Amino acid sequence: MSSASSLVVLDNGAYTAKIGFSSDEEPKLIQNCIAKAKSERRKQFIGNQYEDCRDLSGLYYLLPFQKGYLVNWDVQRQVWEHIFGKEVMNLEPPETSIIITEPYFNFGSIQDAMNEVFFEEYQFQAIHRTNAGTLSAFRCKKEPPKELCCMVVDSGYSFTHIAPYYDGKKVGNAIRRINVGGKLLTNHLKEILSYRQLHVMDETYVINQVKEDVCYVSSQFMPDMEITKLKGAENTIVRDYVLPDFQQIRRGYVKDESSASSANEQCVSLQIIRMNNERFSVPELLFNPSDVSIQEMGIPEAIVHCIGLVEEEMRPHLYKNILLTGGNSLFPGFKERVERDVRAMAPLNYDVRVTLPEKPITYSWQGGKLFSAAENFKELCVTKKEYEEYGQSICLEKFDV
Amino acid sequence: MVMAEAKTKQGSSRLKDANSRKILDQYSRAKRLRKQLEALEQDNFQEDPHIHLNTPNKKLPQFDADEGAPTKKKRKTTRGDHFKQRFRKTFASLVEEEQMSLKEPPNYMTACIPQSKFPARKFCSVCGNPSNYTCVTCGSRYCCVRCLGTHQDTRCLKWTA
Ligand SMILES: Nc1ncnc2c1ncn2[C@@H]1O[C@H](COP(=O)(O)OP(=O)(O)OP(=O)(O)O)[C@@H](O)[C@H]1O
Ligand SMILES: [Mg+2]
Ligand SMILES: [Zn+2]
Ligand SMILES: [Zn+2]
């Protein structure tokens, strides 16, 4: 139900689109993909429709993004039409303004195509294109303790960005990308499990859940490694994970060692994966990409590196306001590890403060919601009229992407 | 690669043999690594479950290259060639375009974080434990005799094919 003129915020991630009216408390999270199942021969599942599919084994994905950039427009259009349509938002684009996010250093032709699609195809009333991190920095600036500088770490599906902000404005030449994100972690977990235990290369959906359910970031990597070599009760890290079979078990879970197996477990022959050093060696790639021969710094070293790229006066302010956003920051232990490692590498006289918001995935969407209420928001939008008159150039001028 | 292999066989002196094998190794090691890294970016490993079904369904909109989802709404979809092209760029061509452009940095390429100052750690390619040994044949890491055995029976050199 859209009112006369409404405003929508769309944080268009490669994994999920976060979308909602600026009047909503929380956005909806819609998978940014089209999925195909083996069991449904004719049907495709757009966005979250796959939830209605009985058998999710071997789920096959069509993704709009590659390496974090929008390249598969056919898929993206179908997902957007689904999201804007009756099933999700039920928008009237001509009566709607939209804030939409895109990755840092988005390619020129993708930017042009975005303007074209949003104005010419969907006919939105006005648009504002920005980076998710910019919305996060905006929110951070507004909330206590209202720091002027903010070091945004956005670790999502495709990659991780380290982006310094000064008074809500990004310091473009000090932003860096680590080519490790949640997609790579899940693929790596699939790979090592398939080699060591059970062929799960086709089970991206299931193994992604395994990752989210049992992986964590270790703050004592080598000692934890030693623990995983121990047998029996001494190994406090190992977990047995029951995979879903989509007959009796719809969702996988950690097997409870202490209690007797449930009635369900007794009659079904369970498929179990043993998660041992895999629990922490997978998220570890965010901290040591070189563990899989990606010759890049990990997050803490990258933070220190990026802070070194900004003017000296700004540095202490960035160290004391490091903001963790994106899905990977939900790994247990993530914040503690970032804090510990940055502390160890930072100059001693600087305070190091790391913040993990309660909801790091929708933090930037909330920033967009706040931003839409800002005084100068209207000026920072391009209206359809302006686009018709000035074309791409006014978008280049107004949007800081 | 085939050629390089043939070359090692022709080599007569042991020294020459060892040398050319080393070159071969480096090449195929790099190739194996590249394959591993590409696999980490892949969307799917299985084939499209509908791949054999799509052929008869040809009422597709014009820029639907490979998919058979009937688009319900009638949007403005008449476009010139240039438009279609813009929506068909691969990631590689986008990067290339950016490299050719005269825009000032920063850009996608300059934003990549550099290499770590810390030395890379070594883990067993079989079990994931810290590893002290390197397979002489292929350069993979292993941690114990058992893992070496598994490695030789399974992956050693297999990925270089
Ligand atoms: N509880 C969790 N623990 C670990 N990882 C998680 C958790 N929840 C989500 N993730 C991971 O976070 C990633 C998605 O994060 P996010 O929504 O920030 O990405 P995105 O914005 O869609 O992608 P991008 O910003 O790269 O375009 C996925 O890989 C997902 O598996
Ligand atoms: Mg994101
Ligand atoms: Zn081993
Ligand atoms: Zn080997």
Image (spheres, coloured by chain):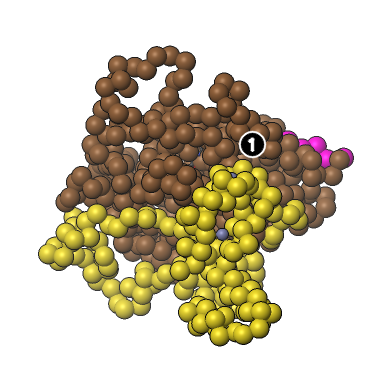
Chain colours: A brown, B yellow
In the rendered image, residue A253, in percent from the top left (x then y), is placed at: 40, 28
Tell which subunit mark 1 falls on: A
The residue depicted at 57 percent of the width and 37 percent of the height is A277
Q: Could one spot residue A176 in this view of the protein?
A: no
Residue type indicated by callout 1 = Met
Nearest the camera: A238 or B118? A238
Magenta segment main secondary structure: loop
The residue depicted at 51 percent of the width and 41 percent of the height is A327
The residue depicted at 79 percent of the width and 45 percent of the height is A345
Q: Could one spot residue A60 in this view of the protein?
A: yes
Mark 1, residue position: A225
Nearest the camera: A97 or B126? B126
Exactly how many numbered labels are in the figure? 1
In the rendered image, residue A270, in percent from the top left (x then y), is placed at: 33, 29
Q: Secondary structure at mark 1?
A: helix
The magenta span reads A349-356
Q: Crowdedness of circle 1 by 10 Å Cα count: few (<14), some, many (20+)?
A: many
